[in-house]
Image: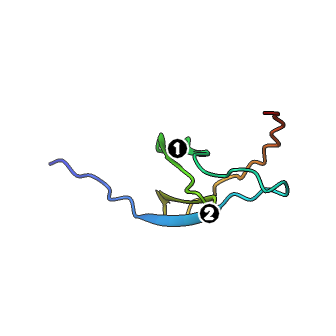
Amino acid sequence: MLSTAQVQRVQIKGTISSELNTDLSGITIFNNSSLEGTVTNDSGVFYIDVKKEINYPLRQFNLNHSL
């Protein structure tokens, strides 16, 4: 008999912000556990599905660029 465990997943919402008022669209958010990703919208908002009841580390990246 084969059985599979059903993993509950939930959608979380996050927001990327910038003190410099830079363009926040198209920033990639990647979940290393599920190998799934998404990108931010024009306001820096993103949605991504994750396993329920698991802690995910958050990392901060400082990007410096000039046009």
At x 83%, y 43%, the residue is 62
**How far separated are the C-alphas under marks 1 and 2?**
17 Å
State the image coordinates of residue 19 (x, y, percent, origin top left): 85, 58
Instruction: Note whether 11 is above or below 67 in the view shown.
Output: below
State the image coordinates of residue 7 (x, y, percent, origin top left): 38, 58
Please indicate whether residue 23 sits to the left or right of residue 35 in the image: right
Instruction: Note whether 32 is above or below 14 in the view shown.
Output: above
State the image coordinates of residue 10 (x, y, percent, origin top left): 45, 66
Quick one: 63 or 52, which is closer to the camera? Answer: 63
At x 55%, y 56%, the residue is 41
At x 81%, y 34%, the residue is 65
Q: Earlier in the sequence, mark 1 or mark 2?
A: 2
Viewer-side label of 1, 2 = 2
Given the image, on which type of amino acid does mark 1 rest?
A: Ser
Looking at the rendered structure, the secondary structure element under dot 1 is: loop
Quick one: 26 or 10, which is closer to the camera? Answer: 26
Which mark is drawn over residue 33? 1
Quick one: 64 or 59, which is closer to the camera? Answer: 64
